[in-house]
């Protein structure tokens, strides 16, 4: 499917509240177009809807305006240079990066990995840094997105507070019990999820 058409479907998924579907589409696009920093940025935005700072930091790692807390969360979860190489899912030489900052970041990660392992490593050869990978589930399971979390993730803290003002209720997930806050009836109803304007996450039209 062409890139533009897939991004249009991502926009439609977000508008309809199908956040997990939008995430999967963007993951596929990043895999197919690993050098496109805009796709990585959009994927980071979706991970913010889940409150997943580490994966938001993962996909913003090559951007100069990345969030320091998200970067720290990424580096904590993927604590070795080899794990960071794998997580960044880059292919080809650093010279293919669109910005000098991205090139510097990837060069720093690759150099640190080579120094730690004592031999050269390559983005296109995962076997070259396999010894630096431990048997560990590096990507935490995604928590369910909530309206207040989504609003906060797109920079609407006041709206998120309004959405959560009705008080929490308890719901059980497979791993833990979580607070899910109902949406205020006064919130604007748009795109299927009351109070959520998913158009905030749409890519700007060319």
Image (cartoon, rainbow, N blue to C red):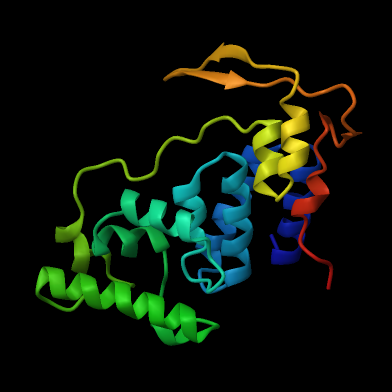
Q: Is residue 64 left or right of residue 21?
A: left
Q: Is residue 102 left or right of residue 36?
A: left
At 33% across and 49% down in the image, what residue appears? 77
Residue 182 place in picture, x, y as percent: 73, 20
Compared to 50, does 108 lie above or below?
A: below
Quadrant assignment, res 146: top right
At 48% across and 71% down in the image, what residue appears? 62
Residue 204 place in picture, x, y as percent: 80, 66
Q: Is residue 33 visible?
A: yes
At 65% across and 46% down in the image, what residue appears? 153
Point out the image quarter for the N terminus.
Answer: bottom right
Residue 60 place in picture, x, y as percent: 52, 63
Q: Is residue 92 visible?
A: no
Point out the image quarter for the C terminus.
Answer: bottom right
At 50% across and 17% down in the image, what residue appears? 173
Q: Is residue 140 left or right of residue 167?
A: left
Compared to 164, does 59 lie above or below?
A: below
């Amino acid at each position: 499917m062409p890139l533009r058409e897939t991004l249009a479907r991502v926009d439609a998924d977000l508008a309809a509240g199908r956040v997990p579907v939008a995430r999967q589409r963007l993951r596929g696009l990043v895999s197919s177009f690993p050098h496109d920093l805009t796709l990585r940025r959009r994927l980071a935005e979706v991970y913010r809807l889940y409150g997943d700072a580490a994966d938001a930091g993962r996909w913003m790692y090559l951007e100069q305006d990345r969030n320091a807390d998200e970067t720290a969360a990424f580096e904590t979860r993927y604590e070795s240079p080899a794990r960071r190489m794998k997580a960044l899912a880059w292919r080809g030489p650093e010279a293919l990066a669109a910005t000098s900052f991205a090139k510097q970041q990837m060069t720093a990660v690759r150099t640190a990995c080579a120094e730690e392992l004592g031999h050269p490593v390559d983005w296109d050869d995962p076997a070259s840094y396999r010894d630096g990978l431990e048997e560990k589930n590096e990507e935490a399971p995604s928590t369910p997105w909530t309206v207040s979390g989504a609003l906060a993730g797109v920079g609407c803290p006041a709206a998120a507070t309004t959405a959560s003002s009705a008080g929490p209720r308890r719901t059980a997930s497979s791993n833990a019990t979580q607070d899910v806050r109902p949406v205020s009836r006064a919130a604007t109803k748009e795109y299927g999820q009351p109070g959520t304007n998913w158009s905030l996450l749409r890519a700007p039209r060319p």
